[in-house]
Image: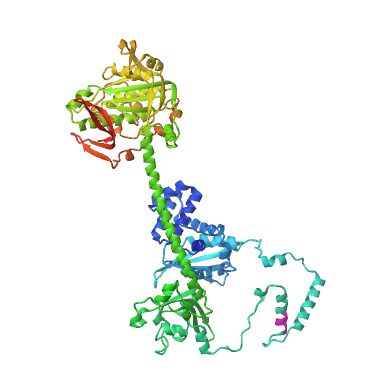
Amino acid sequence: MNKIIEHRSNIAFIFQYGFINTCLKSLVTETFGEDAWEALRAQAGVQETFMTFHVYDDAITLRLVHAASEMLNLSAEAVLKLFGGYFFTFCKVSGYDRMLQTLGGSLSEFIENLDALHSYLALSYQEMRAPSFRVEKREDGEMWLHYYSDRRGLCHIVPGIIQAVAKDFFDTEVEMEILNQSEESTEKMEHVVFLVVQKKVSQRCKERPETTVRSKEKVLDKEDIERYFHKMKEKYLTLSRHSVKRKHWDLLRSVVRFDQGNLQSSFEPIYPERLWMDTKAFCNAFPFHIVFDEKLKVKQAGVNIQKHVPGLLQTGEVGVDEYFTITHPAVPFTISSIRKFINSQFVLEARREMMPKSWRTQPMLKLRGQMLWMGAIQCMIYLCSPQLRCLQELEERKMHIADIAQHDTTRDLILLNQQRLAEIELSNQLERKKEELRILSKNLEVEKKKTEVLLYAMLPEHVANQLKEGKRVEAGDFKECTILFSDVVTFTNICAACEPIQIVHMLNSMYSRFDRITTVHGVYKVETIGDAYMVVGGVPIPVTSHAERVANFALGMRMAARSVKNPITGDSIQIRVGIHSGPVLAGVVGDKMPRYCLFGDTVNTASRMESHGVPGKIHLSPTANRALQNKGFEIVERGEITVKGKGDMITYFLVQNLRATEDDIMGRPPKGDGGDRNNGGSKELSEQNEQSSEDQDHRPAIIMQYADSEQTSNPSDREINRSEHNKCPESAAVSRGDKGEESRLDLNNKEPLGKHNGKTMRMCLLLNWST
């Protein structure tokens, strides 16, 4: 039953209920996709979902229409018209086209009975503010459609719906144009007059089940016609005499039409010469009715109207407008206005000031029914029933089921609607729970992504995914890779002379810059221990350009270190860098805090290159030098040195990259045509360029392209959004240095950074540094 209510609400123009906005969302997603809806929703500034039975402001619908108009480069009128056509299509594919088709046998009848559908839906949708429709047939054959609504700006939906209905139900193509658009002064309602023209009628007629057999009959020849006529004449002679005198040919004509099987089209009603019902019986049989004349003077009323509206007939001739107001349709209480809407259902509400004082605190009686003009006596009769939605409203008005006539279906509607309202409330609760679950699920997905970002920062993505699935991660043998180690020159002396928080600021500033550069060149950060920083190229994803990537990363480290200040002297810190290429074995060790570690002599040799290096220099082993030959790097020979555990080795210094600029290496956008483009090996920068570079180090990184860049394009190497990266977690402490710089410390992840006076210094894993 809820489903029926939802889809019926489409045709009822219930714009303030959430289903209309849901339908608009469905139109956008089906036609343009989910991304288009998200962009439209963001531009309009509305929520993601809408609840069917929740009441929303019309401004939300108008904002969505305005945003759609801008995005699609269409006028708001065109968007509303498209929307109206989609309404009808949605109802048709949902299986309710036959229900709607029963509203009328023609387009004009369909429109005239829309108000009756609105009146019925008002039983379930109490907040519904439905429009009113009136059809005016002109002498020249044109049809004028009068549209009344207290909600402005939505009239352009009407042509979309009417045209879709005419084409599908009545095989008629309709053109509509606005003849007049004004405001009714009495109720401040928008009044729009549409000219409705039938442009084309399809030659194909829809066959109804009862006409199928007749349409297949063969055309009768002359002899068949005579035989058929003789048969009808015999039937006429056997008929009994009727009490009402009719002409001979009228009776014969009715017999012929009756045998043709089309009883409805040939039916002619028979009226008695007098009404066989006395006044008292009529007032009891129809307890809710009012008869009033052209001057609105009450002439007659049903017994129960007299009961619940005291004084209506006891004070002589009174005006019906003195005791009642018309709430729907919104028209003046005059005979001429009522006759214009004679095909609409009228809702009248008793005036509170005319009720006894003891009744004025309770809800007023509302009547819903039909107006009939009796031209012979120049009076209007209002046949009605109490407008009640549920048993609670019946009790509030001090009424009982017995007050409603037994032939009045209002008795059944109240009982059925009581159950339906309970189902609607249950459906509403389910929608609210569904929306709560959707929000929780969305928040859970956000938290899950945060967790994945942290996990992928500790382990390679494919390794982390295997661990999440509970699988055993096998160690991998990599034939070729390049490993880099670096440390801060005189770090022990700096630690001895500074407060621990100053060391934290310095390392955080340096590591934040280094981490950003790993993204630029697609190298994997293995670990940091104290001031030692270790990265590897070609692991865990093998690439042929591993040596180039690590070499460029080393040049970037040296450039970035110039922006990090020594807390003692205030000068830029110096780092030593060592690089070696060779085979390694890589795998995950540990269960409680698993780490992705590298094993093999290549690791030891790379560490020796760092420890035997020179401050401010990038020290290369012979294998690293061979891997970088003919790659566009400037390399100078250091000479033969004695390496602990390795003996004598001829090593080299990496100076610069002759093919890449500093901006390329640092992953910064170019400074422009007028900006200086310094090579990677340049050793002199002006203070202005240095400050600009420092600012750009905190922007999202621009990935440097290599010949095998596609091999490393996986999510584990992506740049973390800086806005999210700058958020301080709940378990974090924020402190400031001497110069106002801010550090954020995660108190849940502590690692030893070094020793001071024989005691291990336990510092926090640094999440971010900002100035």
Which quarter of the figure has residue 235? bottom right
User: Which residue shows up at 43% across the image and 63% down it?
Assistant: 425
Which quarter of the figure has residue 306? bottom left
- Please name the predominant secondary structure of the magenta segment in the image: helix
Left or right position of 770 against 20 = left
* Residue 672 visible somewhere in the drawing: no
Where 248 sits versus 705, above or below? below
Residue 289 among those drawn in magenta: no
How far across and how far down the image is residue 528, in percent? 31, 28
How far across and how far down the image is residue 146, in percent? 49, 68
How far across and how far down the image is residue 493, in percent? 19, 23
Q: Which residues are magenta?
A: 248-253
Where 332 sits versus 193, above or below? below
Front-most of residues 338 and 604? 604
Where 185 sits versus 289, above or below? above
Q: How many numbered tags mark residues here? A: 0
Left or right position of 388 against 763 = right
Quadrant of the image for the C terminus? Answer: top left
